[in-house]
Amino acid sequence: VTSPTYQVFAVRYARRDACRAQHFLGGDAHDEPMPMDYFLWAAVSAEHTVVVDTGFTAAVAARRGREYLQCPVEGLAAIGINADQVSHVILTHMHYDHIGNLDRFPTANFTVQSSEMAFWTGPYASRGHFRTLIELDDVLGLVQLSLGGRVRMVSGSAQVVPGVQVHEVGGHSPGLQVVSVNTAAGPVVLASDATHFYANIDTDRPFSIVADLADMYRAFDVVRTLAGHNALVIPGHDPEVMRRFPTVASNTEPLAVRIA
Ligand SMILES: [Zn+2]
């Protein structure tokens, strides 16, 4: 019996200008422009479509000064995925740029780590730095979905559908999880914010937003182990992703690529 394989896509929905020193804990000596992209991802087989993260809304983009390229739901539609019919959504963590638009997935069940849900409904979520990383409506929406029986809270590693697994890593957010997907090209690791850029994991330098630094280094190790010699690691925010893989949707610039 062979494990099912998936096609994997990255959908780019927003961007912002930034500088190199902002993306590494402790800064960087070469403070040159280093823009950031915002993504969601999808794994598609004949039997299953799994969406990984749900982006943010146009209203949040405007409030936070992000350049909105497209609604994430429209971005999925452009690669043939109807959000109305998606049954599995993985939420890597609960930061504002990963769990907006939940109401646009009316038939989905959402997989999140128990530790992540506990943190953002617990005693430290309201504290200065942490509070800026979430949107109240998103957290309330996820709690509402949970009480409606539509959230699967997992601890550690779990299979979402055959060939798609989540793995708790923490670090950047207390219950951050990464996703490994079986593909014809071998395992693809959707690292999300376990590594914002290729440069974070390639140079072993964590991103600047930290919940637990030791866990961030451990997350690099987990991601490397999951990827194996195949080394198909997809960072959470790197514009380079749009250059390394073939474009499958665009307007004036690329909006989605096929990773495998
Ligand atoms: Zn992020």
Image (cartoon, rainbow, N blue to C red):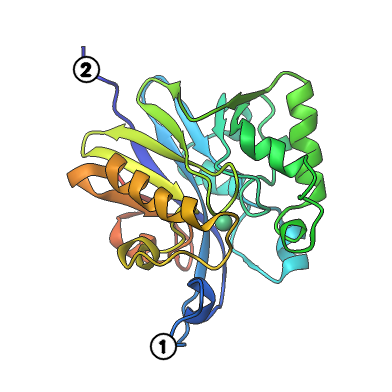
Dot 2 falls on a residue whose secondary structure is loop
Give the spatial CA distance, label 2 vs label 1: 47 Å
Residue found 63% across the figure and 30% down from its top: 84
Q: Position of residue 35 (x, y in %)?
A: 50, 75
Disc 1 residue type (three-letter): His
Q: How many numbered markers are drawn?
A: 2
Q: Which residue is mark 2?
A: 2
Q: Which mark is residue 30?
A: 1
Residue 256 seen by the camera: no
Does label 2 or label 1 sit earlier along the sequence?
Answer: 2
* Residue 228: quarter of image: top left
Classify mark 1 as within 8 Å of ligand 1 or not, answering yes or no: no
Q: Residue furthest left?
A: 229
Nearer to us: label 2 or label 1:
1
Q: Quadrant of ligand 1?
A: bottom right
Dot 1 falls on a residue whose secondary structure is loop
User: Which one is nearer the viewer's eye here, 26 or 41?
Assistant: 26
Disc 2 residue type (three-letter): Thr
Residue 224 is left or right of residue 118, and the answer is: left
* Residue 82: quarter of image: top right
- At label 2, counting other C-alpha atoms closer than 10 Å, the crowd grade (few under 14, some 14-19, many 20 or more) is few
User: Which one is nearer the viewer's eye here, 36 or 155?
Assistant: 155
Q: Position of residue 74 (x, y in %)?
A: 59, 47
